[in-house]
Amino acid sequence: MKLRSIRVLTTLVAAIAAVTGFWLAHRLEHSVPALTSGTWLPQPRDPGAFSLIDQNNAPFTAAQLRGAPTLVYFGFTHCPDVCPVTLLQLAQVVKTGVVPHLRVLFISVDPARDTPNQLAQYVHAFDPDFIGVTGSPAMLQTVAQRFGVAFERVALPGGDYTLDHSSTIFLMDARGHNVAVFTAPYDVKSLTADLRLAAGELG
């Protein structure tokens, strides 16, 4: 092989090695967080357009999910145990400050009973900055389906009712996209550790 050909081949091999090294370094730098209490999604999920009503009786749209990371949880204020326990845990996680400007959005799937005033009293009992929203049954069904949440009204003796619902926590990045999901049972220490790992990916 001629000397010139050897030099060209050597240069080509060096270039390929450099590109490969850069690619591997980029992959390692941007590897997904290894969560212990949840799953980092392969691709961020856009919840699409929606229009709900918040605890101040003001419109709440998908655009308002942008600007800061948000933990989203579906439930209802008459929930006897799972919802209040989960919101208390989320309040404790937020207070750690592990993710700056982290918000919590509680979406009520019980619009018949969860008026804006009821929502305000409920979510603010856990944290004055928590956001409570609800909406029409049709819109709630749409939003729930987009997040992969199921809920169903269950009749109780005497004409009352409760709601069975998914107990998943959704992590939204500052672009308003769902990037991770957490599943029960929850532990404040584990959630905090996972959010610390994810903090750099939420901007």
Image (cartoon, rainbow, N blue to C red):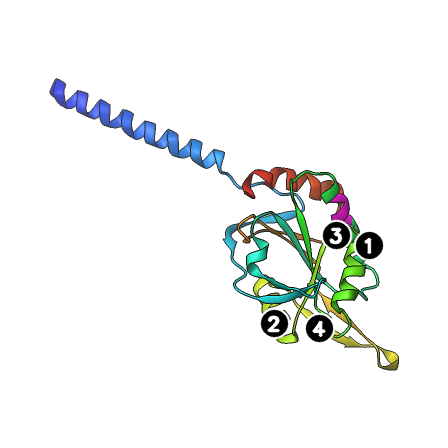
Closer to us: 25 or 146:
146
Q: Provide residue 199's location: percent of width, then percent of height.
A: 60, 40
**Are the residues at dot 1 and dot 2 in contact (C-beta closer than 8 Å)?**
no
Say whether residue 13 is left or right of residue 101: left
Please state which of the two labelled residues, at mark 3 or mark 4, is closer to the viewer: 4
Q: Which residue is mark 2?
A: 139
Read off the magenta span: 89-93
What secondary structure prevails in the magenta region? Answer: helix
The numbered mark, 4 or 1, whose residue comes first in the sequence reads 1
Q: Amino acid at mark 3?
A: Pro
Closer to us: 99 or 188:
99
Q: Alpha-carbon neighbours of circle 3 within 10 Å: few (<14), some, or many (≥20)?
A: few
Give the quadrant of residue 151.
bottom right
The numbered mark, 2 or 3, whose residue comes first in the sequence reads 2
Q: Residue at x 65, y 41 (%)?
A: 194
Q: Which residue is mark 4?
A: 152
Q: Residue at x 42, y 33 (%)?
A: 24
